[in-house]
Amino acid sequence: MKTQLSFPSFATDEAAKTIIKKLLTKNIQTRSLGGLTSTRNLSYFDGFDWEDLYQGKMNPPYIPKKFKK
């Protein structure tokens, strides 16, 4: 299927659009974001604390009701 991907007018973050486009690539060989190192270096993740993520120090932004205590 060769449908042109379009985003709503409020979707203005070009870095986020780039990630979405790459993840929606049909060919699995070209879908990859380039591995973990390349993904971490995308401008979308500027300011993200990967060490805190690895150490389990981050709280999830949303917890579904099924899993809430």
Image (tube, rainbow, N blue to C red):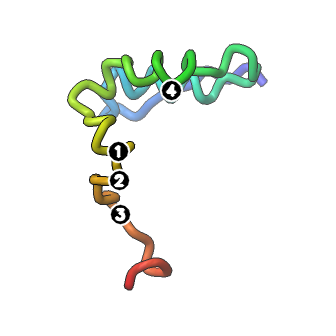
Q: Which mark is residue 6?
A: 4
The residue located at (45%, 30%) in the rendering is 7
Quarter-wise, where is residue 25 in the image?
top right
Residue 24 in percent (x, y) is at 63, 29
Mark 2 belongs to which amino acid? Gly
Q: Is residue 46 left or right of residue 23?
A: left
Of labels 3 and 1, earlier in sequence is 1
Of the pair 13 and 7, the residue shown nearer to us: 13
The residue located at (26%, 34%) in the rendering is 48
Mark 4 belongs to which amino acid? Ser
**Mark 4 crowdedness (10 Å alpha carbons): few <14, some 14-19, many ≥20:** few
Q: Secondary structure at mark 4?
A: loop
Q: Secondary structure at mark 1?
A: helix
The residue located at (46%, 19%) in the rendering is 37
* Label 3 to label 4: alpha-carbon separation: 27 Å
Q: Secondary structure at mark 2?
A: loop
Circle 1 residue: 53
In the image, which is nearer the foreground, mark 3 or mark 1?
A: 1
In the image, which is nearer the foreground, mark 4 or mark 1?
A: 1
**Mark 3 crowdedness (10 Å alpha carbons): few <14, some 14-19, many ≥20:** few
* Label 2 to label 1: alpha-carbon separation: 5 Å
Quarter-wise, where is residue 10 in the image?
top left
Disc 2 vs disc 1: Cβ atoms closer than 8 Å?
A: yes
Mark 1 belongs to which amino acid? Leu
The residue located at (37%, 17%) in the rendering is 41
* Label 3 to label 1: alpha-carbon separation: 15 Å
In the image, which is nearer the foreground, mark 3 or mark 4?
A: 3
Q: Which mark is residue 56?
A: 2
Disc 3 vs disc 1: Cβ atoms closer than 8 Å?
A: no
Classify the position of the C terminus by image quarter. bottom left
Circle 3 residue: 62
